[in-house]
Amino acid sequence: MLVHCRPLGRLLYFGRIDVTLDGKEDGFALTSRIGIRREDMYDWERRAPLVPEDLKKASVTADREFLIQSSDRRIFSDDEYRAAGLAVVEDLSDCPMIIGLKEIPSDILERGKVYVFFSHVIKGQPANMPMLQRALDLECTIIDYERIVDASGRRLVFFGNFAGLAGMVDTLWTLGRRFAHEGIRTPLESIDQASTYANLAAAKASIVKAGKRIDAEGLPEEIRPLVIGIAGYGNVSKGAQEILDLLPVAEIHPSDLLRDSDCLRVSERAPIAKVVFREEDTVLRLDSSAPFDLREYYAHPERYRGAFERYLPALHVLVNCIYWESTYPRLIAKGAIRRLYAHGQPTLRVIGDISCDVEGGVETTVKATEPDDPVYVYLPAEDRAVSGVAGPGPVVMAVDILPSELPREASTYFSHTLKEFLPAIVAADYSRDFETLDLPGELKRAVIVHRGSLTPEYRYLEKHLAAA
């Protein structure tokens, strides 16, 4: 296929498509079609990387033709994209660049194409190594949203606090169901799963209504004060706290959990206690003669040990919002939960693992879930999971596509962040060697694979590919 642009310049072979480039003082701009793929990894995935209004503007400002792959599940319908003047098609084979969200199945990848999506390979995740190897074999280029970061490593394209928003709604829904199973009736039973609400406003209204009932009716004596801990303080945590703060809560310090009298005094101010844990609360330095140092912890986590188990006896709920890698101590090990449940039902009922690293920071997250079967009980004595809320162990909510439960708002937010980088992404000349690839630093750091080779920053993945 030969695509002509304005004044005839030089021809460049780009993947499977010959394209014509027009010369400008600031370099050559690639004129081609960009495909927006439908999501097919999960039945429940309804998000879109770019919403109609943003694509309508981008098609003009970036001087590109965007083709939308038809989908009957996407929260933004085909007709909404058509109304924005965009073409909706079934086949994206004519597009040298494909933009999506979640992992792309290996058999979908095509030779020489550029793919922009969440690849989930940077930790060497075994499940995604075959896809990565296939991309290498087909001489593809992969740009990973997770690695679009500034010079300090701060992520620039993400779903904001939507995982936290949906995750806390689902955690409260789970808690209400667990208490009901135990015969403990609470207003939390009126809260539904985030995916059942029409939008975020409807979900929040439901939480507010439950909060008013808690104010008026109180909570049963055996669970008062209801203590909900949140590990982490970033965007995900902020979303979780935004939902939790719609209930009658009083915030306490982690150290208060180690003194029963201080924790119990919360019930005089509010029926629910909120506790936010930072790094210095969850680990202890091996050499206790020196104080905790955050920079040292990130640079030398081997100098620290996990110390979160001491808080578990006081928590009804733990909501995990931390980013974790294997070099860091776990927040919760299986052994800690085994010891906690060794003598019957403890205080802890629910773990809302929003971060959802399987057997990672929360080792009892033994599998990820989807919205149609979102929770399971981890049975510590047997080291296995059973679906639902019944069983001698904590209920684990581990949905790993939580923003998809608030698909319209989450997609709009993500699209607004991505659109700022879209002109540079689609204008780059990907036929160049990586060293001369004309991308700004934020985007160049996100290129995992270029033309079939791991880029220098990601060559450590070779050992994970070999082990797969």
Image (tube, grey):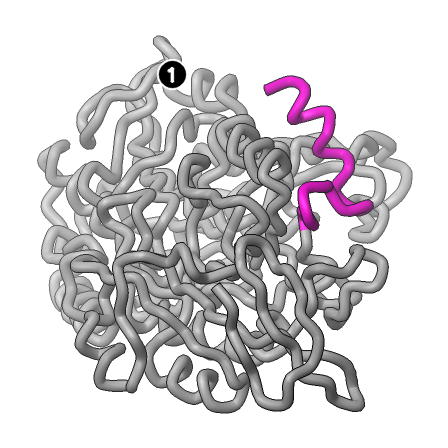
- Start-end of magenta stretch: 448-468
Q: Residue at x 39, y 69 (%)?
A: 242
Instruction: Quadrant for residue 19, please give it.
Output: bottom right
For this orientation, the residue located farthest to the right is 289
Q: Nearer the viewer, residue 262 or 299?
A: 299
For this orientation, the residue located farthest to the top is 382
Q: Can residue 319 be seen by looking at this rendering?
A: no
User: Which quarter of the rendered picture does the C terminus lie within?
Assistant: top right
Number of callouts in the render? 1
Instruction: Quadrant for residue 287, please give it.
Output: top right
Q: Position of residue 101 (x, y in %)?
A: 43, 56
Residue 73 drawn above or below residue 139: below
> In the image, what residue type sits under mark 1?
Pro
Q: Reply yes or no: does residue 467 show up in magenta.
A: yes
Q: Position of residue 84 (x, y in %)?
A: 28, 86
| Residue on which disc 1 sits | 380
Residue 204 drawn above or below residue 116: below
